Image (tube, grey):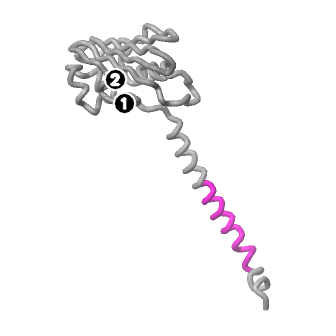
């Protein structure tokens, strides 16, 4: 008896199981690919760093604190601090995320989303200004364009 004759009675009962296993493997592979694609296309999340900077009691200490490291700022030399101001410059490295394709707009959207009590009072193509109210103080946050994909963030109180 040939192998084909021995397997053929089993084939109708195995086909649904094989199809189900292949479908599950394909679905799993697609889910993994989608998760990896989403992570790579997302801009850097800066809420933690922005919150740390705005809440700082002494801006001059921020250069030594890793929690104040803004995504895209390569080192502490990109930021200047005084007792009442924190000023950083950097080049935006992220790509358009499908909703916002301008680094300044992306930064402005992040600032607006990061703080529960924020007023967005200036919105131009080269400058966005916010007033963030915390329990301790009011802080001015200005995001502006310095050049092609070059951003400046200035936080003052």
Residue 88: give x, y in percent of width and height.
35, 20
Q: Is residue 79 above or below residue 44?
A: above
In this view of the protein, can residue 46 be seen by the observer?
no
Going by the image, does 12 lie left or right of 105? Answer: right
Badges 1 and 2: C-beta atoms under 8 Å apart? yes
Q: Residue furthest bottom?
A: 1
Res 152 seen here: yes
| x and y, in percent, of residue 35 in the image | 53, 45
Name the residue beneath numbered marker 2.
Answer: 78
Q: What residue does disc 1 label?
A: 74
How dense is the environment of label 1, judged by Cα within 10 Å: few (below 14), some, or many (20 and up)? few
The residues bearing labels 1 and 2 have C-alpha atoms spaced at a distance of: 7 Å
Position of the N terminus, as image quadrant, is: bottom right
State the SS at label 2: helix
Looking at the image, residue 119 lies above or below residue 94: above
Local SS, label 1: loop
- Report if residue 23 lies within the magenta region: yes
Residues rendered magenta in the picture? 10-27
Residue visible at 48% across and 10% down? 123
Q: Residue 13 lies in magenta, yes or no?
A: yes
Whole-percent x and y of residue 148? 51, 19
Name the residue nearer the viewer: 81 or 105.
81
Q: Position of residue 99 (x, y in %)?
A: 57, 26
């Amino acid at each position: 008896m040939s192998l084909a004759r021995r397997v053929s009675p089993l084939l109708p009962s195995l086909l649904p199981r094989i199809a189900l296993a292949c479908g599950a493997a394909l679905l799993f592979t697609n889910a993994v690919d989608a998760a990896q694609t989403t992570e790579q296309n997302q801009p850097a999340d800066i809420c933690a760093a922005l919150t740390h900077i705005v809440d700082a009691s002494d801006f001059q200490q921020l250069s030594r604190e890793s929690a104040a490291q803004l995504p895209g700022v390569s080192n502490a030399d990109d930021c200047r601090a005084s007792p009442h101001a924190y000023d950083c410059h950097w080049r935006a490295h992220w790509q358009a995320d499908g909703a916002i394709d301008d680094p300044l707009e992306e930064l402005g959207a992040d600032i607006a989303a990061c703080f529960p009590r924020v007023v967005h009072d200036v919105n131009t193509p080269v400058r966005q200004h916010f007033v963030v109210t915390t329990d301790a103080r009011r802080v001015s946050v200005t995001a502006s364009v310095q050049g092609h994909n070059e951003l400046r963030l200035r936080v003052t109180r």
